[in-house]
Image (cartoon, helix red, strand yellow):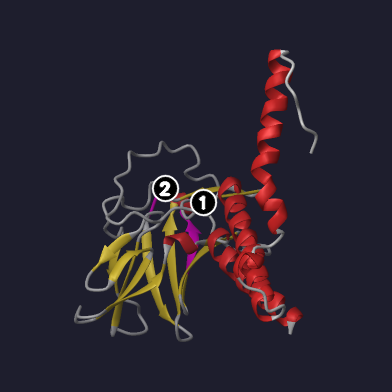
Amino acid sequence: MTRVFWLTCLITNLVILSSFIHADDPCRFDHTKGTIDLTTVGRTDGKAAYPDQIPPTSRDYKYSYNPCKPFTELPSCENVAACQVSADGKYSFSIGLQNSAQWNPGAGLGSIPSVTYIDGQKQTNVQLQCSTDGSEQFEALGESPTNFYKFRLTHKCACWDGCKNTPQPTTTKSPGGGGGGGLGGGGAFIIILLVLAFVYFVGFALYARFRLERSGVELIPHRTFWVALPGYAKDGVVYLYSRVTNKTTTYQSV
């Protein structure tokens, strides 16, 4: 029973943690092949750079896409990377979020890079076709299989190092924010620390309550250590202060 409990806690918190740190930068992809930077391709005013594209396979739905920054398209797509809209415009569905972006450099000779966005069970893959003549085209290729959507973006910025040195414009934050990349190392460390602290305190308290049948302050893990910790901290500060100022201070060893 105890092993099952701790294993469940560990798996649950790992899933929560992965949802925070898994995403890539939705605007820029650095690889040994070079850099793909879509910063200047996407609009920054909360609208889609490529709105209401109809796929050749079906006219039941139209699709909108904005690289790099989130956009909103009524009635239901808010702060998304890609949106599916019914032909009559009455319904819209998010089919990918910017903060879920995952880049793929392409494997094998002649393969092209791509970026994938996810929202729940829906997944949108955008193939990035390099344009060497300056042409630009966005194609919505449709849904196949169910909940899996395919786009193709032909652009000079889809080339490796095609827009690497392009000056980035002053961006306007879209309504509601969002669209950032994954957390940095500091953010990930803080999340890991909070998750471990949660497992430590809550897990021990539940174990002590239901397994050891304890109650009250006895639910606190290593209670004597935490009670004495402020005193330890005070002694440490006093000791460091005396060393820095060269003043003799009575120091009680821990």
Q: Amino acid at mark 1?
A: Cys
Question: Residue 134 lies in magenta, yes or no?
Answer: yes
Q: 71 or 56, which is in the foreground?
A: 71
Q: Earlier in the sequence, mark 1 or mark 2?
A: 2
Give the image location of residue 101, x and y in percent: 50, 61
Residue found farthest to the right: 253
- At mark 2, the secondary structure is loop
**Which residue sits at x=35%, y=59%?**
66
Q: In the image, which disc is placed on residue 212? A: none
Q: Find residue 18 and report its image quarter.
A: bottom right
Instruction: Find disc 2 in the rendering and name its residue.
Output: 39
Give the image location of residue 100, x and y in percent: 49, 64
Q: Amino acid at mark 2?
A: Thr
Instruction: Find disc 1 in the rendering and name its residue.
Output: 159
Whether residue 239 is situated above or below residue 195 in the rendered picture: above
Span highlighted in magenta in the image: 125-135
- At mark 1, the secondary structure is loop
**Which residue sits at x=65%, y=60%?**
196
Mark 1 touches mark 2? (CB < 8 Å): no
Question: Residue 107 lies in magenta, yes or no?
Answer: no
The reply, left or right, for residue 128 in relation to residue 238 is left
